[in-house]
Image: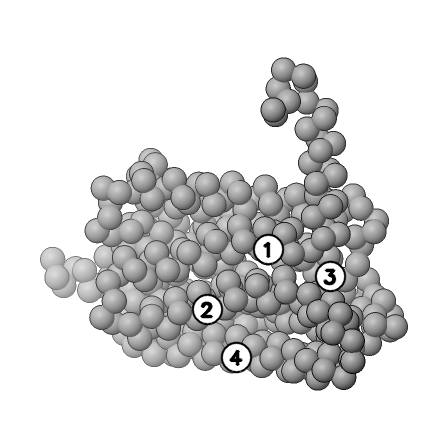
Amino acid sequence: MAAFNLTPTIPSSFILMGIPGLEAAHIWISIPFCLCYVIGLLGNFMILFVVGKEQTLHKPMYLLLCMLALTDITTSTSLIPKALCIFWFNLKGITVGACLTQMFVLHMGTLIHSAVLVAMAFDRYVAICNPLRYTTILSNARLAKLGLACLIRAVLFILPLPLLLIRNSFCANLIIPHTYCDHMAVAKMLCGDITVSKTYGLVLASVCIGLDLTLIALSYCLIIRAVLRISSKKAHQKALNTCTAHICVMLTSYPVFLFSTLTHRFGQGIAPQVHIILANVYFLLIPVLNPIVYGVKTKELREKVSKHTYRMCSRWPVDFKPT
């Protein structure tokens, strides 16, 4: 039997275990998963709807926010419905193609999310340091090219991950102790040495995220230098307030991602359940927090959302209007 398990295979499907060791609590764990998914979808679709409807919001800042919303919708939709099927119906099987596609979409979404945050930092730099040329520098055409560049970068860098996996055979029992097809979880089932795949994944995360963080830090250094040259304290506060939402989104995104990535590769002493929960927290909370942060911190967006929410509620039949 041991020899059989070590025989290279070309599997037709894998088995996702959810959160091993917490099977009895899967039904309870599914509650925050479902709530976060629904709230995230509502919040991000609301942003897309409001920005699309309001001509006054067709500005670089809000168009970039739409890119962020689309990324969050895509990544969460590629993960959470399958996780809920595991928790609710014990449907653990996933085909190899679906598994590798899910891996590709999730990791691609992470890189796009990071790239859009860099673009947002550049947007804030131009708005504060070159306000008179803001609409010229960040025209809609350039924003479209910027979004396309973010997508192409993510595809080119993430595509080797599934390709490195699919060209090898699998020797393990094809059981993935996770709620989704994480790169390292799938790589550990490969026959032979996985050093190339493991190293590429680590270098990819380090270089791309490291470069993005460096560019964001550079943008904010230039912003701070420009703000310090302004004599008015009121102008200081107004300039920095425009960056608050972006800073809050970064503080919720990067620490969770980096901690999850590092503990998965180097935290051998940490329980597997902690690894899995941390990995899910990133994809669960970020789609929920981004629209809330921008809705609360951005007055113009908050007012437009309130206006459209009131209009939708006012169209309900009298018997169903909220009290």
The alpha-carbon separation of the residues under discs 2 and 1 comes to 17 Å
Confirm whether residue 96 shows in the render. Answer: no
Query: Looking at the picture, which amino acid does disc 4 mark?
Result: Gly
138 with respect to 273 (left or right): right
Alpha-carbon neighbours of circle 2 within 10 Å: few (<14), some, or many (≥20)?
few
38 with respect to 194 (left or right): right
- Nearer to us of marks 2 and 1 is 1
Alpha-carbon neighbours of circle 1 within 10 Å: few (<14), some, or many (≥20)?
some
225 with respect to 290 (left or right): right
Alpha-carbon neighbours of circle 3 within 10 Å: few (<14), some, or many (≥20)?
some
Task: Look at the numbered discs 1 and 4 and tell me whether their residues touch, using CB distance below 8 Å.
Answer: no
Q: Residue tagged by mark 2?
A: 255
Q: Residue tagged by mark 4?
A: 210
Image x and y of residue 8, in percent: 26, 64
Q: Residue tagged by mark 3?
A: 61
The alpha-carbon separation of the residues under discs 1 and 3 comes to 14 Å
Mark 3: secondary structure: helix
Confirm whether residue 3 shows in the render. Answer: yes
Task: State which tag comes first along the sequence, 1 or 4.
Answer: 4
Query: Looking at the picture, which amino acid does disc 1 mark?
Result: Val
Q: Does 103 sit above or below residue 132? A: above
The alpha-carbon separation of the residues under discs 4 and 2 comes to 12 Å
21 with respect to 266 (left or right): left
Task: State which tag comes first along the sequence, 2 or 1.
Answer: 2
Task: Look at the numbered discs 4 and 3 and tell me whether their residues touch, using CB distance below 8 Å.
Answer: no
Location of the C terminus (image quadrant): top right
Q: Which mark is residue 293?
A: 1
- Nearer to us of marks 1 and 4 is 1
